[in-house]
Image (cartoon, rainbow, N blue to C red):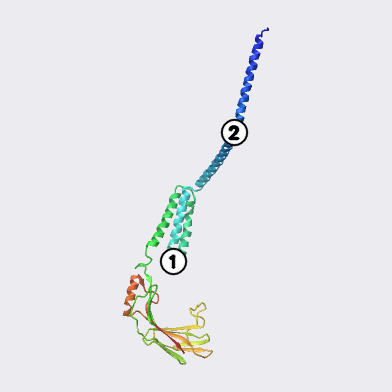
Amino acid sequence: MGRTTGSDGRRDVADRMRDCDRLRNMAASACRIRRTLHRPRALLDRDEHRARARVTRRRVSRADSGRRVCDLHAPPSGRASVILTSLITAILWFPVVAALYDLVGRVALPVIAGAVAIVCTTFTPLISVRAPSHRALVAAMATTAVACILMQLLIAPYTPEWPKRMNIQFVDDHWEIDDLAAPPAPKLMLDAPQCDAAAVIRCRSLRGATRIALSFYAPDLVSLRVNGVAPPPNPPKFRSRLAPGWHLVSVRGASEAEIEIVRSHGGPLNAEVRDRSNGLPPEAAPLIRARAAAVGVPSHDGDAVVMRRKVRL
């Protein structure tokens, strides 16, 4: 039998070691392939998570840059200028707005609210900027709005300093009081005024009232004279409160009046005569007490007694 030389033995050992390394590499490759085949969903989830993380970081960086830009455009001096502008606008406009209620009354409330809203827009830059005082300003405005609403709901609308307009009148045969149910009160037994049908109509108050008036329907009216005097023509912008064809003659400070009516066509004349005396008789005491309890006072024409009569002249 032959013997193997030393050089041949070393080559065999080297070949075997290379074969072993090749087998180990092949086994490692097979393991990696097997892991890839068995876990494809995990790899996809990992990639998706990484992509979302990158998008989130990008958005955060953009938001930070935007806040930095806002901060750059809203230095302390800018905030001070906004506050100064708001104060000057309020000083100029609020006295005018507050006087509207005294001049017009409740009708001016929408106008006052709109003017205050416009003035408040001058400090909106302080709210739009994400400054340290942003939350404090928003909270202060919300608290002020809620407080104003509660004050409006809880405070009485009328006080002795700001009473309600309420007139008491006795008309024909019953009592009337503005915005309040009239309590029981004695009726007055008074005579209604009279008119004498003639060429010159003579109207008089039988109870000596200080105002007498005659309203009549005459669409064909040509001329009119009251106590021998022709009244001046109405101004161009005059607007009558009466229906078309109706006319009103009112004489104050007298209990009688002579009225001459000239028409283009003859025929009967439908009219209403009434007299008015200011003030209330003692029988109105229950109504006066009810008005005082409702914080009301007379206004405009005030309290009065009115008697009416329809006539055909």
Q: Is residue 248 something one can see in this rendering?
A: yes
Quadrant location of the N terminus in the rendered image: top right
Judging depth in this view, the residue of 85 and 42 nearest the camera is: 42
Where is residue 209 drawn, in percent x and y? 37, 84
Residue in view at x 41 percent, y 55 percent: 143
Q: Position of residue 170 (x, y in %)?
A: 37, 80
Instruction: List the single residue furthest toward the front.
Output: 1
Q: Amino acid at mark 2?
A: His
Asked if disc 1 and disc 2 are in contact, CB closer than 8 Å, the reply is no
> How dense is the environment of label 1, judged by Cα within 10 Å: few (below 14), some, or many (20 and up)?
some
Which residue sits furthest bottom? 198
- Asked which quadrant contains residue 296, the reply is bottom left
Which of discs 1 and 2 lies nearer the camera? The answer is 2
Residue closest to the eye, 157 or 121: 157
Q: Is disc 2 placed on a helix, strand or loop?
A: helix
Three-letter amino acid code of the residue under disc 1: Leu
Dot 1: element:
helix
Q: Separation of disc 1 and disc 2 at Cα?
A: 82 Å
**How dense is the environment of label 2, judged by Cα within 10 Å: few (below 14), some, or many (20 and up)?**
few
Which residue is rendered at x = 45% and y = 57% of the image? 88
**In the rendering, at what x and y percent does residue 108 appear?**
45, 66
- To which residue does mark 2 refer? 38
Q: Is residue 232 visible?
A: no
Q: Which residue is mark 1?
A: 100
Q: Earlier in the sequence, mark 1 or mark 2?
A: 2
Query: What residue lies at 57% left-to-right and 38% top-to-bottom?
Result: 45
